[in-house]
Image (cartoon, rainbow, N blue to C red):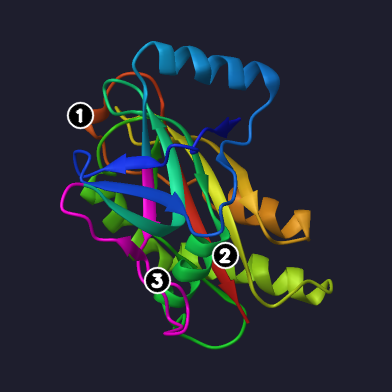
C-alpha cells in the first residue's frame, strides 16, 4: 500500500517539507483486503505518523537541509518507521525500516554475559494509544535477568547447536488479559532466525509469564510486541 509523497510530507505545522533520502517508496505491506481496510480508515480520519533520522555521517553527502527558506524548508530524511493512527491515536498499522533496525542494534549495546544469550527490548502496545504500563516493562526487565532470560538463552543455544546463526532478532506478540495480567497467547510476530524451532521456543518461554493487572487497559485483550535480541 504505497503512500503518495510526490508533494513531500509536511511537518512542524507546515514549516518543513520532508522527502525520503533515497526517493524510495514509502508504504505498508498489506494484502488487498487489508489495504482496503486502511484506505477506509484514512477516509474515517486516520493520520500518518512518520519517524525519521536527520543528518548523515558522511560529510561529502548531500546535506539534509536543502533549502532553508524563510517560509518552508525542504529536508531529506532517512525514514525510520511509519504508522497509521486512528482518531484516538491507536496504531492501526506500522512498518519499520532496515535503517531503524540497524540503529536499534547499535543502540542496544552489548548483551551482558557469555555464550548464547538474549536481551529483552522495550515492549510496545499494538493497536492502542499510550505507553506500555511501567510495571509491565519493569516485570519484563526483571524476568530477563532471571528465569526468563535463561529460558531464552537456552532456546538460542539449542538453535545454534542445530546449526543456526549466532545473532538475530525475534519479536514476540503477547495477548494479555489486562484484568488479571495473564498471558493468553504467545506467538512469533517477526523473526530473523531461520530456525523456526528456536523462534517458537522463544515465544513459548513467555506463555506462562504473568503481569500485574492494568486497570488503564481494561477492555478487550491487549496485544504487546516484545523484541528479543540474540547473541552468542
Residue 82, percent from left and from top: 45, 43
Could you tell me if residue 207 is visible in this image? no
Q: Which residue is mark 3?
A: 145
Which SS class for mark 1? helix
Dot 2 surroundings within 10 Å: few (below 14), some, or many (20 or more)?
Answer: many
Q: Which portion, as a residue range, is magenta? A: 50-71
Is 170 placed left or right of 93 in the picture? Answer: right
Q: Is residue 66 magenta?
A: yes
Q: How many marks?
A: 3
Near-viewer residue (153 or 32): 32
Q: Which residue is mark 2?
A: 152
User: Measured along the vertical axis of the image, is residue 173 above or below residue 158?
Assistant: above
Of the two numbered discs 2 and 3 on the same chain, state the one appearing first in sequence. 3
Q: Which residue is mark 1?
A: 215
Q: Residue at x 31, y 40 (%)?
A: 10
Could you say which quadrant of the image residue 139 lies in? bottom left
Of the two numbered discs 1 and 2 on the same chain, state the one appearing first in sequence. 2
Is 137 placed left or right of 32 in the picture? Answer: left
Which SS class for mark 3? loop
Residue 110, percent from left and from top: 46, 83
Q: Is residue 111 magenta?
A: no
Residue 63, percent from left and from top: 38, 71
Could you tell me if residue 134 is visible in this image? yes
Can you name the residue that lies furthest to the right here?
A: 163
Can you name the residue that lies furthest to the bottom here?
A: 114
Of the two numbered discs 3 and 1 on the same chain, state the one appearing first in sequence. 3
User: Measured along the vertical axis of the image, is residue 127 above or below residue 17?
Assistant: above
Is 45 placed left or right of 168 in the picture? Answer: left
Amino acid at each position: 500500500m504505497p503512500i503518495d509523497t510526490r508533494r513531500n510530507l509536511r511537518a512542524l505545522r507546515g514549516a518543513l517539507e520532508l522527502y525520503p533520502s533515497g526517493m524510495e517508496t514509502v508504504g505498508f505491506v498489506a494484502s488487498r483486503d487489508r489495504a482496503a481496510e486502511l484506505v477506509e480508515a484514512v477516509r474515517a480520519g486516520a493520520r500518518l505518523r512518520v519517524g525519521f533520522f536527520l543528518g548523515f555521517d558522511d560529510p561529502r553527502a548531500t546535506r539534509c537541509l536543502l533549502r532553508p527558506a524563510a517560509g518552508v524548508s525542504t529536508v531529506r530524511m532517512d525514514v525510520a518507521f511509519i504508522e497509521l493512527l486512528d482518531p484516538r491515536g491507536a496504531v492501526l498499522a506500522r512498518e519499520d525500516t532496515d535503517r531503524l533496525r540497524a540503529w536499534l542494534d547499535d543502540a542496544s549495546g552489548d548483551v551482558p554475559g557469555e555464550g548464547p544469550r538474549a536481551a529483552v527490548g522495550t515492549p510496545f502496545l499494538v493497536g492502542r494509544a499510550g505507553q506500555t504500563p511501567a510495571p509491565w516493562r519493569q516485570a519484563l526487565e526483571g524476568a530477563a535477568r532471571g528465569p526468563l532470560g535463561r529460558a531464552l538463552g537456552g532456546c538460542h543455544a539449542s538453535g545454534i547447536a542445530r546449526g543456526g546463526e549466532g545473532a538475530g532478532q525475534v519479536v514476540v506478540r503477547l495477548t494479555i488479559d489486562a484484568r488479571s495480567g495473564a498471558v493468553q497467547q504467545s506467538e512469533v510476530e517477526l523473526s530473523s532466525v531461520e530456525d523456526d524451532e528456536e523462534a517458537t521456543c522463544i515465544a513459548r518461554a513467555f506463555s506462562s509469564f504473568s503481569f500485574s493487572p492494568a486497570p488503564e487497559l481494561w477492555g478487550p485483550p491487549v496485544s504487546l510486541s516484545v523484541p528479543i535480541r540474540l547473541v552468542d
